[in-house]
Amino acid sequence: MGSTSSTLLKIPNVEVLMQETGFSPAHMIRLHDRFKLRCLFPQDFGAIKELAMNPIGDRIIGAFFCPGKETVDFHTFVKILAHFRPVDKNRPKEPNSPEPINSRSNKLRFAFQLYDQDKDGKISRDELLKVLQAMLGMQVTEEQLESIADRTIQEADLDRDDAISFEEFRKVSPEILHSRCFIKV
Amino acid sequence: MTHIIICLLFLVCELNHSVTSVFPESSLLIMLGFILGGIVWGADKAQTFKLIPTNFFYYLLPQIILDASYCMPNKLFFSNLGAILIHAIIGTCWNAGTVGIALWACYEGGAMGNLNIGPLQFLLFGALISAVDPVAVIAVFEEVHVNEVLYILVFGESLLNDGVTVVLYNVFDAFVSLGGPKINAAEIIKGIVSFFVVAFGGSFLGVVFAILISMLTRITKNVQVIEAGFIIVLGYLSYLTAEMLSLSAILSITFCGVCCQKYINANMDEKSVTTLRYTLKVMANGSETMIFVFLGVSAIDKNIWVWNTGFILLTIFFVVIFRFIGVFFLNWILNQSRLIPIDITDQFVMAYGGLRGAVAYGLAALLDEKKIPEKNLMLGTTLIVVYFTVILQGITMKPLVQWLKVKKATHSDLTLNGKMNNRAFEHILTAMEDICGRMGDNWWTRHWNYFEDKYVCWLLLKSDARKHKDPIFGAFHKLNLEDATKYVTEGERKGSLDFIRNYDSASVDFKKKLALEYGDITPYITGIDNVPVTSVMKNPIPSVSLDIHEQDRKSLPDKLSAHHLLDQHLYKSRRDNRPTYSRSHYNTSENPDEMQEIFQRTMRSRLESFKSAKMGVNPAKKLSKHPKKDSTHKPNGKPADPHRTHPYGDEDFEFSADSASSSEIAGHFHRRSTNTPGAGVDNPAFIPEMDTSPPMRNPPWQTETGNNTAVAPSQRAQGRLPWTSTNLRHLALLRMSTRSTDSFVMADASLDEEAPEEKPGTHHTRL
């Protein structure tokens, strides 16, 4: 397999990355091999047919690209993937350290950002409607969609501002099971 | 007569699904066989119906394997090929060796009493009993929905271990003939070499036949009715040829099916493909039924039973134990280098799913009694092992799988938010897995794809088929065609092609027609909104009061209906992984319509974002009709922004005539990219296509951009169609597979046959 340390060194800032994301060196090497030093363009993602089969595929692709940038570099790629590592159940609670990327709340934040397209920190009714539209089949009428959206906001919206903020989002999403929250990289 | 009974009873069982959910079909069939055997025995006092090995190996088995390999999920198979091979080869050898040696040790220890067996015969017995049987695996796993990877591992192993089984069987058979003392290193080496020859020879032969079949389907355009027949015959021929050459026949037919499926599906007409699939399923189902029934019938035969408790019990014990040990050990090794390690529960199911079946029985029945005096004992034991695995393990498999898996949360308690988020998370995770997976196209995959594109497709695919290879492009193309046909149908309905005669003033008012609201379509905002909303057509919308308080006042059923709607209509994600091969169900994917729908919506939205991106880039240009590029890939039924204030209704594809050059493409791309940073996804398959496609052939006097009054686009058929008299013919379809019955379009189809040839080879120009 070659010497891991030399491969590891080829990745820029690998120490920092490993620290931030919590991936092990083996993981980093695997990810790097897969990433192959390409700066990914949107069409690289677009060529993945399975993503086109995913109702929110395009949004997910958008999440990889910071606004203003056209390419994804390895850093961003790894950081985003790091969201989906299994949660470390035995992480010591240090009050001063920043939360690891794969904590539950960061996962939720990632999902929140997918909903919140205009990045104002709240999911407005329109944005919710768009997401529902994407995820629901075409047999659902506008009226039904809107009623679902309204009910959803009603459930979650505690401060009655007709939008769901991240805190409210967190409160209504405790049920996401651990088994659904990670992939094995 | 027996067959009729079998068929009838099969039908009865099929109807009674409550039974089959507990007892897998195979076990029911075996028991049926017992009954039938009892009847025949009672009538004839001799078992006239037995499973004769020749019948089994030549007439019953090949179609099952062909069906299984034709429907094999190739990508999954090849990506897990390493694991499958390791299990097939090393696992089977391990099983054979250990079972044989353990039994011999027990024999030496006196557990079995007096038998006329030598160690080599034990090894032979071990070899024939070690093979995991594909028929049994299919039969049992179909009821149990395990995830794809697990399924393919067990199933693939069962198919590929034939190479090993055959070799081991033959080698040990030869050893038994030679007798103990004559075996030396030379013989052993011969054995090992024969393995390579048999296995690789069989596979190679299968591939040769696959190539033959694919090339054949290139030229069977005029005999489409019997195309399916050719394939079945040639598949069977590959089996026979391998048998004739003493190579592994199962491997041959497996690889024949696996390799040719992609090409023949592309080459053949849809009807032929359907025919082939159904025919194979019918044949395979029938064979499987008969095999299991005969397995049952064969038991009711006094002549074969030599009961030796020790032997039988020990065999069962060792078979199970060594299977478990082997599987766990091999998986542990594999997990060291696998990217996605195999779960413990999955491993357990793998081990438990090592079912023996008719192949073992067939091999046992082939034993020569003169060489192996205890043939009947072995035969009887084999039968019992088969019953044990198929019936007992088959019945307990499903409860076991359910028991082992973590229980899912009960959905009834979830809030709407919870449901939505759960589903969203599933989608996100699936997407992440896909991204990782695809990004991880390794050296082999990339080079194979390249090689395939360049040479294989040239050889094996019809010229038409080659063009439609890219699924994304295909979907894109289909969407455009749909739009075009819809547009024309609307136009016709409006009245006698009014819009042709009087293009300027024809107002095909889709808005009125379809009663859709356009108010809520947000205009495309450059760079911010990645996902412009496609107003998806739904049922006609009554006006609705969106007052939340009013909803509060509504009664409880409303709340339930929202939950109900979510439950019913949320798109399913692929995390509910089911095996893609099923004996009785035709669908290759869980919800093909849903997939199709999602796919089309995604494509549509990408289409729009791409086009909208183009808007700002291309000023109105006068179009030159480019006869060479009149191939109809993009008859423009594309949705354009319906807002009349935007002055870009007609500009969609006003590329200069020689935009085929890649510099232009690059130029377009760069402009586009600066225009819309991070604006979502553009499929490389269609960026260059769009650029070089024939320009929207707006009539010359149509260059005015503010001309949106003429047509209020429907959400589906927006934009204009090129419709000058010469261009109308190119409105038609490349391939009539969308089955437009629009006479207008049909009339043009014939004119359109030449058009496909001119498709520029831009299909392969990727940026």
Image: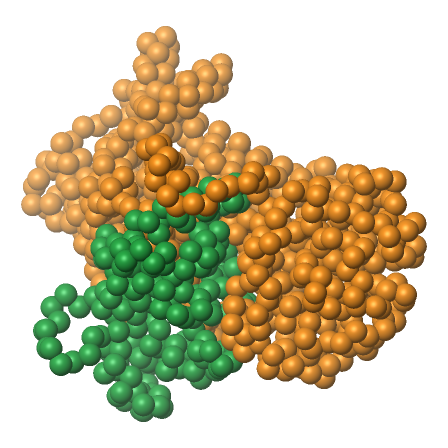
Residues B673 and B765: in front is B673
Question: Is B416 on the left-hand or right-hand side of A69?
Answer: left
Vertical placement of residue B134 versus B447, above or below? above
Q: Position of residue A165 (x, y in %)?
A: 31, 63
Vertical placement of residue B260 versus B117, above or below? below
Colouring chosen for the image of the structure: by chain
Q: Position of residue B761 (x, y in %)?
A: 74, 70
Residues B396 and B516: in front is B516
> Residue at position x 42%, y 24% from top?
B14
Q: From where the camera sits, is residue A123 visible?
A: yes
> Residue at position x 60%, y 46% from top?
B537
Query: Chain A drawn in what color?
Result: green
Q: From where the camera sits, is residue B629 visible?
A: no
Q: Position of residue B723 (x, y in %)?
A: 86, 55
Quarter of the image where the C terminus of chain B is located: bottom right
> Residue at position x 34%, y 32% from top?
B555
> Residue at position x 86%, y 52% from top?
B505
**Which chain corresponds to the colour orange?**
B
Residues B13 and B313: in front is B13
Residue A99 falls in image quadrant: bottom left
Q: Position of residue B49 (x, y in %)?
A: 41, 20
Vertical placement of residue A67 versus B508, above or below? below
